[in-house]
Image (cartoon, rainbow, N blue to C red):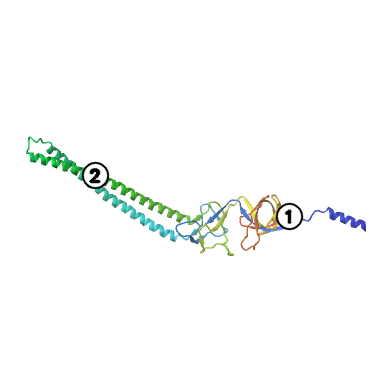
Amino acid sequence: MWRSYLWCAVLLASAPLCAESLLLTGQIASIKAQKMSVPKAGDAWRYQVQWLMAEGDVAKVGQSVVIFDKSQVANQIEQLQAALLRVNAEEKSSANQLQAAVLQAEFNEKQARLNREKAALDAAIPVDFIAAKDYADHQFALLKADAELEKMQQALDDAHQSLRGNLHKLAIDKRKAEVELAKALKDLDSLDLKAALEGPVIYAQVTNQDRKVQVGDTVQIGQHVVTIPAMEDLQITAFVNEVDIDKLALGTSAELRLDADLTQPFQAKISQISRQGVVLPGWGQSVWFEVALSITEPVLKLQPGMSVQIQIEVS
């Protein structure tokens, strides 16, 4: 009897410490994904979701996925188009008026030059051939013609400068109107979010609410609304409580089962452990650490967004 007791003690002493199973809930995710957020468009800081591609549908590259209400930006575009038409009309009208002023100044300058040439011919007649009074009148007329010519030349220079200055200002106004219109058109296009890669549409969770984004929601600039994960380079992400995080190590194996099919287990290994914990809304006050697992064997029919059960053996 003592021998059997001794044998049992030896067995207990030599047995390894019992392993503990850590059970987690995770999700299939893609290493490469496109996150769609509310763009900065126009003067507004909130926009209404007008249309969403159905969640779970696979978006093709270039397809519209989210469309926000465009009415405010569209109204702004109408105003900017009207402003550009006014600037163009003003440019043409002012250019015609200024060109007419230049032509008139050129005519006046030419007329003054001809008058000066005539006065110069009269003033060149020697005093010996005409009366002294006539000679004096001719000299005075030449001085007046010189002054008038100088005045008309200055007026012509002023007309040219006015033409150049006003056309330059009008060109600036026109360019400003064109830039503002181009920006508004770009803003309008930015309210139609398109897929940059092929993948299933996954709606974002609404902050502090137990639901996802939906049509009719008013969302603010920068708010996450949709994610499109790529269909390749898949991994599993899960959150581990601060109590258990020190039990995990890179390379630790895990057994996974899809919630949609619990009969087919597959294997993965921990590939990344976050160093910074977060408090998750609705998960209490505990700190959670994100863990990524890479799939070590091919599994059919895996898609981003699928939920999985994870079992990790820890000591």
Judge whether residue 5 can be spotted in this image.
yes
Does dot 1 land on a helix, a strand or a loop? strand
Give me the disc on residue 154: 2
Query: Residue visible at 21% across and 43% down?
Result: 150
Question: Does any portion of residue 301 appear in the rendered image?
Answer: no
Q: Amino acid at mark 1?
A: Glu
Residue at x-position 87% and y-position 56%: 9
**Residue at disc 2, secondary structure:** helix
Provide residue 138's location: percent of width, then percent of height: 12, 40
Residue located beneath label 1 in the image: 313
* Residue 202 horizontal side relative to residue 123, left or right: right
Quarter holding the N terminus is: bottom right
48 and 199: which one is in front? 48
Q: Position of residue 291 (x, y in %)?
A: 65, 54
How far, Cα to Cα, is label 1 from label 2? 96 Å
Viewer-proximal residue, 181 or 234?
A: 181
